[in-house]
Image: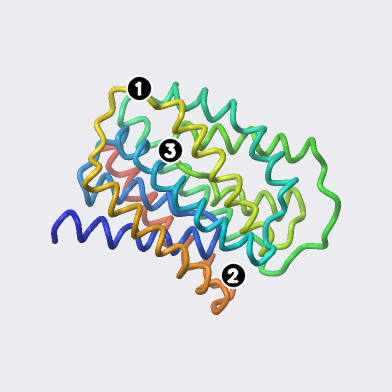
Amino acid sequence: MSALLLALAAGAVVGLALGALGGGGSVLAVPALIYLLGFTPAAATTASLIIVTATSATALYTHATCGNVRWKTGILFAAAGIGPAIAAGLLAARLPEAALTAAFAAIAALAAAAMLKSPATDPPSHPVRPARAAGAGVGLGTVTGFLGVGGGFLAVPALVSVLGLRMRAAVGTSLLVITVNSLAALTARVGTPTSLHWAVIAPFTGAAILGAWDGKRLAAKVSGPTLQRTFAVVLLAVAALMLADALH
């Protein structure tokens, strides 16, 4: 299969994940870029930030039109992560590729565990505490900058369990956080000597953007817990593959 077709297929899956779950797209984008399209880990994490920034912004618009975004909470959460995202992005450029791959595998496994433990029903709503929102935002920004992931797979469980948002609001709000954090981390990598293959990144991004619209419709037809469990199993497989590669 040609690189173009692989990029289109992988992009569609990434977009579906972001649109339906409010996260998880970058956890698939990075291994797809490495193992299917031949990117180095450093180039894959940078390319993933480009893809996820554009796709999450599109998905954010679709959720905002349905009233699923809690803007004040999302802005506070995202703002706290901008500085850590930039700092971690600068650090990531100096690490060995095997270390980045192993760290990504660990985060993917953590994401799968978080999705499996996420409650099947919405928790009781309660006021958002600014300190909690800021603390969660710092942690998420660090992960975003370091590994080139949007962090939605961690943001959604945090918005539900730590900040008490309803599931639909958590999915929509996470897309705001992903967009801001990914853009901040991408800014930190501007000027680094990483080679980017735009002939692959452009169709990948286009397919992901279209997939995000379909993901939003999919989320309305399939229950949230079913989507989360299916995606968690995929993440565990990705984590095992990347950890084996890092230890090889």
Question: What number is the disc on residue 178?
Answer: none
At numbered mark 2, what does the secondary structure look like: helix, strand or loop? helix
Q: Is residue 83 left or right of residue 13?
A: right
Q: Residue at horizontal 26%, vertical 44%?
A: 34
Quadrant (top left/top right/bottom left/bottom right) for the N terminus: bottom left
Q: Is residue 94 left or right of residue 36?
A: right
In the image, residue 4 sits, relative to residue 186, either above or below, namely: below
State which mark lies toward you, 2 or 3. Answer: 3
At numbered mark 1, what does the secondary structure look like: helix, strand or loop? loop
Q: Residue at horizontal 37%, vertical 33%?
A: 100
Mark 2 or mark 1: which comes first in sequence? 1
State which mark lies toward you, 3 or 1. Answer: 1
Query: What's the amino acid at mark 3?
Result: Gly
Mark 3 or mark 1: which comes first in sequence? 3
**Residue for badge 2:** 225
**Residue for badge 1:** 191
Q: CA distance from mark 2 to mark 3?
A: 26 Å
Q: Residue at horizontal 61%, vertical 51%?
A: 174
Quadrant (top left/top right/bottom left/bottom right) for the C terminus: top left
Q: Nearer the viewer, residue 86 or 117?
A: 86
Q: Residue 122 in the image: x percent, y percent?
A: 73, 66
**Residue for badge 3:** 148
Query: What's the amino acid at mark 2?
Result: Pro
